[in-house]
Image: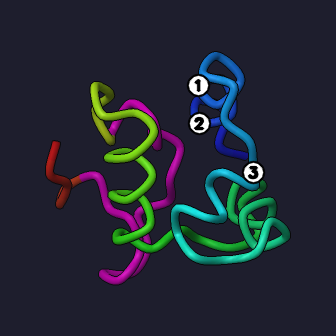
Amino acid sequence: MRKTLIKRMIDEDITNSDLAKTIGVTERTVKNKISGELDFKLSEVLKIRNKHFPKEKIEALFEDFPDKQSDKFNTAHTCS
């Protein structure tokens, strides 16, 4: 579960639908990504941060991301 992202979404009144439009997927896919069933791609993380949370560091928004594969989000390779 992406608790920090969820909290910031609530604070800023951002919906799953908003994120889905931003990254070009369905609301169901966003729900699965937020719940941890699916991983966000780095490109999706960047789009979300840049559009909805431009003042936030990626590491803060997505601090609970797994450090798995190179095509998945990895805090060691972020641009803030």
Front-most of residues 58 and 50: 50
In the image, 59: left or right of 13? left
In the image, 2: left or right of 54? right
Q: Position of residue 34 (x, y in %)?
A: 70, 54
- Residue depicted at 53% across the width and 43% down the height: 64
Q: Which residue is mark 2?
A: 5
In the image, the segment drawn in magenta is 59-75
Total labels: the figure holds 3
Mark 2 crowd level (few <14, some 14–19, many ≥20, 10 Å Cα): many
Secondary structure that dominates the magenta span:
loop
Q: Position of residue 30 (x, y in %)?
A: 72, 63
Q: How is the image coloured?
A: rainbow
Compute the Cα span from label 3 to label 2. Answer: 11 Å
Q: Which residue is mark 3?
A: 16
Q: Which residue is mark 1?
A: 8
Mark 3 and mark 1 in contact (Cβ < 8 Å)?
no
In the image, 28: left or right of 57? right
Check disc 2 and report its element: helix, strand or loop.
helix
